[in-house]
Amino acid sequence: MAARALVLQTSFLGDTVLTTPLIAELAKGAIVDVVVTAASAALLKDNPAIQSTIIYDKRGRDRGVRGFVRLARQLRRNRYTAAYLAQGSVRSGALLRAAGIPTRVGYETSAGRHFYTKRVPYIENEHHASRLLRLAGVEPNPSRLRPHLYPGAEERAAVDRLLGEAGAATDDLIAVAPGSVWATKRWPYYAELAPELDGRVVIIGGAADRELAEQIIQRVGSRAIDATGKLSLLASAELISRSRVIVTNDSSPLHLASAMGTPTVAIFGPTVPEFGFGPLAPKSIVLGVTTLGCRPCDRHGPQRCPLGHWRCMREITPRDVAAAVHTLSTKSPLPTSSA
């Protein structure tokens, strides 16, 4: 009987993208299923390393004792030989123990570590894709780290329609992703940047980012293409793949760009790449104010600057970012850097 592995990843969308190298590694020797949120399941569509995705609706259908027991029974029926906990809550650990999975691998620092049969170190200054690969007992190297997503015909058609309606040529696109769930991670000058960019500006994001998109459109008019709220996550990845460069905050579009290999200008304010979530695209530049003693101030980014000045974002100018875009548009591949 073939080995069956289960990966549990119910964290943020970017974490799901960064879990794809782990999934690909496990698939070399096992049939792999993945437990994810509904939003993340859409990102993993058509991934050839995954046999099936199992949606874990922690705040809905699977909430409470009944949902816990129902999902545990479902997982038990699949007779997994091993489970890998990319998300380390107590509930997740207890769920996989209740499912009767004999080998449960997670980080030694996780809240649910007492439910694990094997604990691995969580290395703070390592990229998260590398940390995740360590769950499989793999010594990470750069060739294994880059994540991958697999937009299909449906996603390509959606992007074709969007660009066709805008009369845009694929080779003329510069993507910008101005949004973030965390307010202090939103660089405030995307509207000022847009006139400095040489190409059609395509705005990536969800429906909640439309106000930010409107600010850009007010500055450059029809030269901007508003994709906010119009595409699925996987179709957004396809659109990013057709762009010359993307400018993004420390948020999920950064990881979509890494998966699609799009040159990336990543703007980091209250957070830093050393937390493990910097770009993995073949060409990337990280911009951040490195002289501030108060930075980093938070693992995710607070809703307000604790000191009230927000210099970590305000001191990165549109000229700085435009210069980085120009560099990535014209130079040979660069390592990730900081300024």
Image (cartoon, rainbow, N blue to C red):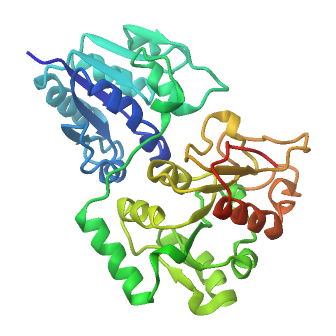
Residue 285 % position (x, y): 70, 51
Q: Is residue 312 above or below residue 130?
A: below
Figure check: 269 above or below 66: below
**Which one is in front, 234 or 11?**
234
Name the one closer to the observer, 123 or 239.
239
Q: How many numbered marks does the figure carry?
A: 0
**What residue is rendered at 75% in x and 47% in y?**
270
Residue 199 locus on image (x, y percent): 61, 79
Where residue 242 sits, quadrant-wise, is: bottom left
Give the left or right position of residue 69, taking residue 94 as reference.
Answer: left
Pick out the residue farthest to the top. 117
Q: Residue furthest front?
A: 332
Query: Which residue: 62% across, 42% down?
Result: 278
Looking at the picture, tell me which residue is in the foreground, 101 or 260. 260
Q: Is residue 300 left or right of residue 205?
A: right
Q: Residue at x 42, y 14 (%)?
A: 137
Instruction: Report the front residue among 24 and 188.
Output: 24
The reply, left or right, for residue 141 in relation to residue 248 is left
Left or right: residue 134 versus residue 102 is: right
Residue 62's spot in the image, x, y percent?
27, 41
Which quadrant of the figure contains the N terminus? top left
Q: Residue furthest left?
A: 1
